[in-house]
């Protein structure tokens, strides 16, 4: 199939950034700010429909996502004509530079063209340049947004999150600790595992991982936008505290990154009163 020259980038703005907790937390906190942001997100999705939003399923740092958007906007303003098949050739050529392929990925992602989408998808499945894995992931979701926008005629919403999501659920990382920073007993660890899994799964929250250490534990979870995850977490804490009042009611809840053990230890040392 032959394709004519594409004169300029797709005129519909393909990305709408929704500011979902793009913030690093330096202390354990209550969820009031997160509640407000998630509440506004639920309202927006209720108005525009669940099918209008997109989220990256891979873990790409927010900074790299923003870099992609800035680059995409720069190309849009340049409005330079290009030929789709030429850009596909560049993308799969071992002779081309990483920078040139960044441009090809972004250009291909800018047009409502299934062939362009499939080319990006093929490249991303096994990038010739490993350093373009995140960039091609962004191009793939961007291309999907452009296609959906063209087919539906509706504005699409992209939710920027460092931890991504899956199947219309957003991924979050949560950190909990004991009140006095004393070590959890074997029985307390069992209680934590049982109560948090019960409360979260009851609310249709997918628990990907619970990691219980000496005086803290972390949970990596996926939850739908139409539930109040705070109530499930608070319920789990309260149930655990029926058995000795050992958990701190304050906790960290973020979609920016998964904290390392060293980062957690430093955080707990700063917040221990």
Image (spheres, helix red, strand yellow):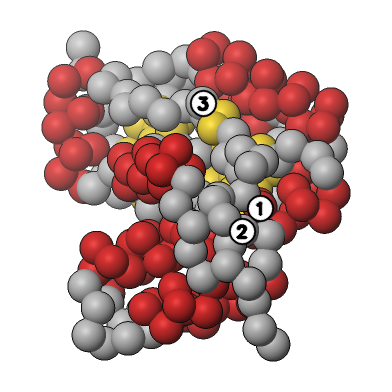
Q: Which mark is residue 19?
A: 3
Front-lying residue, 67 or 21: 67
Q: Which mark is residue 111?
A: 2
Which element type, helix, strand or loop, lies under badge 2?
loop
Front-most of residues 107 and 162? 107
**Residue name at image x 50 percent, y 39 percent:** 160
Task: Give the distance between the C-alpha atoms of the residues marked 1 and 3, in whole angstroms.
Answer: 20 Å
List x then y, in percent, for residue 117.
60, 70
Asked whether the residues under the numbered discs 2 and 1 touch, taking CB atoms below 8 Å apart as contact, a structural biologist would say yes
Using the image, determine if residue 205 lies above or below residue 18: below
Alpha carbon separation for disc pair 2 and 3: 25 Å
Tell me how far mark 2 sits from mark 1, CA to CA: 7 Å
Question: Given this view, does label 1 or label 3 mark the residue nearer the observer?
Answer: 1
Identity of the residue drawn at 54% across and 72% down:
84
Residue 6 appears in the picture as rendered: yes
Task: Kindly tell me whether residue 132 is visible in this rendering.
Answer: no
Indicate whether 61 appears above or below 5.
above
Q: Earlier in the sequence, mark 2 or mark 1?
A: 2
Residue 146: which disc? Answer: 1
The foreground one among 169 and 232 is: 169
């Amino acid at each position: 199939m032959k394709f004519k020259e594409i004169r300029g980038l797709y005129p519909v703005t393909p990305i709408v950034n929704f500011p979902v907790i793009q913030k690093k937390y330096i202390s354990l906190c209550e969820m009031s700010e997160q509640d407000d942001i998630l509440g506004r997100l639920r309202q927006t999705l209720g108005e525009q429909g669940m099918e209008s939003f997109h989220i990256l399923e891979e873990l790409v740092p927010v900074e790299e996502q923003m870099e992609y958007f800035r680059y995409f906007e720069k190309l849009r303003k340049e409005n330079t004509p290009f030929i789709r098949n030429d850009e596909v050739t560049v993308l799969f050529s071992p002779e081309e530079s990483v920078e040139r392929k960044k441009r090809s990925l972004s250009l291909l992602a800018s047009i409502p063209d299934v062939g362009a989408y499939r080319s990006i998808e093929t490249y991303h499945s096994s990038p010739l340049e490993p350093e373009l894995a995140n960039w091609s992931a962004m191009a793939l979701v961007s291309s999907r947004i452009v296609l959906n926008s063209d087919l539906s005629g509706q504005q699409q919403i992209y939710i920027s999150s460092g931890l991504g999501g899956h199947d219309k659920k957003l991924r979050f990382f949560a950190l909990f600790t004991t009140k006095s920073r004393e070590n959890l007993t074997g029985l307390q660890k069992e209680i934590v595992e049982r109560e948090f899994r019960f409360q979260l799964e009851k609310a249709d929250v997918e628990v990907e991982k619970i990691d219980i250490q000496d005086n803290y534990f972390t949970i990596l979870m996926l939850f739908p936008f139409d539930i109040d995850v705070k109530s499930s977490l608070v319920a789990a804490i309260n149930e655990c505290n029926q058995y000795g009042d050992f958990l701190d009611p304050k906790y960290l809840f973020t979609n920016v990154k998964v904290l390392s053990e060293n980062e957690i230890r430093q955080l707990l040392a700063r917040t221990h009163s």
